[in-house]
Image (tube, rainbow, N blue to C red):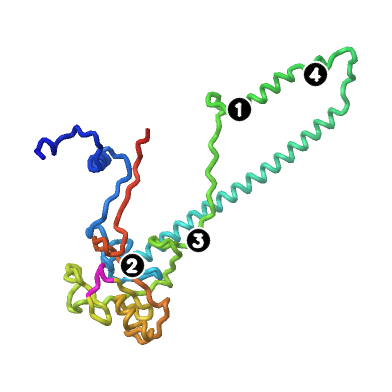
């Protein structure tokens, strides 16, 4: 095929490539992209600060946090919950006062209605020579029409303009939730993590510049995003999942502290992806945008 044929735009078929190109340029339609390695945090980074942890702690679901960052998050959430609870109690008290005033006004209205009915017991004598329509007091129909018109809202008369009611606040939950899993989180339930350094003689600056910073506490295998690993609750040591399956599960004993283990004491660490499709992590990101419909 000649170059003119390759660059031809007069085809009758709207190709997939042209559709994706126009979608990206127009700003409409759902965009999806596969994340690369640079867009994924390392396994030893905090889920809040996205920086390598200095004093790492892990939740029961395997999410790693910097101790100071998660403590500040919990304190901030508790302060926010206290503010919401205070606003809810204020709204509740105001609603209670409003209900009491409404009940008093209803009782007063009933009393006035009773007084009016009692005072109208003695009625005027009925004239048998007049019709019922003539016996009605003057202005009854006009009053009814005026009353019905006043009940309707109007945007032009200030006294009849509809008012927006205040939004009712729901009672806030006092439970602090994990920012990643959405489950309840407590500082007392966090487990301190102790990574085994590749070289104990390296300082923090040189350590952060290395790709392989930590190794398994038992097998001395290098740890990374491509290596599934777990945290042992009694000692806080980080070992590979292969070590757990082949060595630790045989006698269920912590090889570092010597304590007996249960299934709850083995916390599988949540790790980032590697950029490859076989990493076992969903690396596709989607952005929902407006869609043009005919």
Which quarter of the image is occupied by the N terminus? top left
Q: Earlier in the sequence, mark 4 or mark 3?
A: 4
Q: Earlier in the sequence, mark 2 or mark 1?
A: 1
Residue 288 locus on image (x, y percent): 35, 46
Asked whether 24 falls inside the magenta stretch, the response is no
Q: CA distance from mark 2 to mark 4?
A: 84 Å
Q: Quadrant of residue 219?
A: bottom left
Among all residues in the image, which is located at the extreme left?
2
Dot in front, 2 or 1: 2
Q: CA distance from mark 4 to mark 3?
A: 63 Å
Q: Do callouts 4 and 1 mark residues in contact (Cβ within 8 Å)?
A: no
**Seen in the image, is 93 located left or right of residue 109?**
left
The residue drawn where x is 36% and y is 85% is: 250
Q: Which residue is mark 1?
A: 152
Q: Disc 2 on helix, strand or loop?
A: loop
Q: Disc 1 on helix, strand or loop?
A: loop
Residue 174 - label: 3
Residues drawn in magenta: 222-227
Q: Which residue is mark 2?
A: 270
Q: CA distance from mark 2 to mark 1?
A: 60 Å
Q: CA distance from mark 4 to mark 1?
A: 26 Å
Label 4 environment density (alpha carbons within 10 Å; few <14, some 14–19, many ≥20) = few
Q: Nearer the viewer, residue 221 or 176?
A: 221
Q: Earlier in the sequence, mark 4 or mark 1?
A: 4
Residue 136 - label: 4
Residue 112 locus on image (x, y percent): 77, 34
When the figure is inspected, residue 287 is found, relative to residue 36, above or below; the finding is above
When the figure is inspected, residue 74 is found, relative to residue 196, above or below; the finding is above
Dot in front, 2 or 3: 2
Residue 135 locus on image (x, y percent): 82, 17
């Amino acid at each position: 095929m000649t170059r003119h044929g390759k660059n031809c735009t007069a085809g009758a078929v709207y190709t997939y490539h042209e559709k994706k190109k126009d979608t990206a340029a127009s700003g409409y339609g759902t965009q999806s992209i596969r994340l690369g390695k640079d867009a994924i945090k390392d396994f030893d980074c905090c889920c809040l600060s996205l920086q390598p942890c200095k004093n790492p702690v892990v939740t029961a679901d395997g999410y790693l946090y910097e101790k100071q960052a998660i403590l500040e998050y919990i304190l901030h959430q508790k302060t926010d919950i206290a503010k919401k609870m205070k606003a809810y109690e204020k709204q509740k008290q105001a609603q209670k006062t409003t209900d009491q005033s409404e009940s008093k006004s209803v009782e007063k209205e009933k009393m006035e209605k009773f007084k009016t009915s009692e005072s109208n017991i003695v009625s005027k004598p009925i004239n048998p020579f007049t019709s019922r329509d003539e016996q009605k007091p003057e202005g009854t129909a006009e009053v009814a029409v005026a009353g019905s018109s006043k009940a309707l809202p109007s945007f032009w008369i200030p006294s009849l303009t509809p008012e927006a009611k205040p939004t009712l606040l729901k009672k806030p939950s006092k439970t602090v939730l994990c920012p990643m899993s959405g489950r309840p989180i407590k500082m007392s339930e966090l487990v301190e993590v102790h990574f085994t350094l590749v070289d104990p003689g390296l300082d923090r600056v040189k350590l952060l510049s290395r790709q392989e910073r930590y190794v398994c506490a038992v097998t001395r295998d290098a740890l990374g995003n491509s290596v599934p690993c777990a945290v042992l609750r009694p000692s806080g040591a980080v070992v590979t999942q292969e070590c757990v399956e082949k060595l630790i599960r045989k006698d269920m004993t912590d090889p570092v502290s010597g304590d007996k283990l249960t299934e709850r004491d083995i916390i599988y660490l949540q790790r980032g992806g590697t950029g490859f499709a076989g990493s076992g992590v969903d690396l596709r990101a989607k952005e929902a945008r407006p869609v043009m419909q005919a």
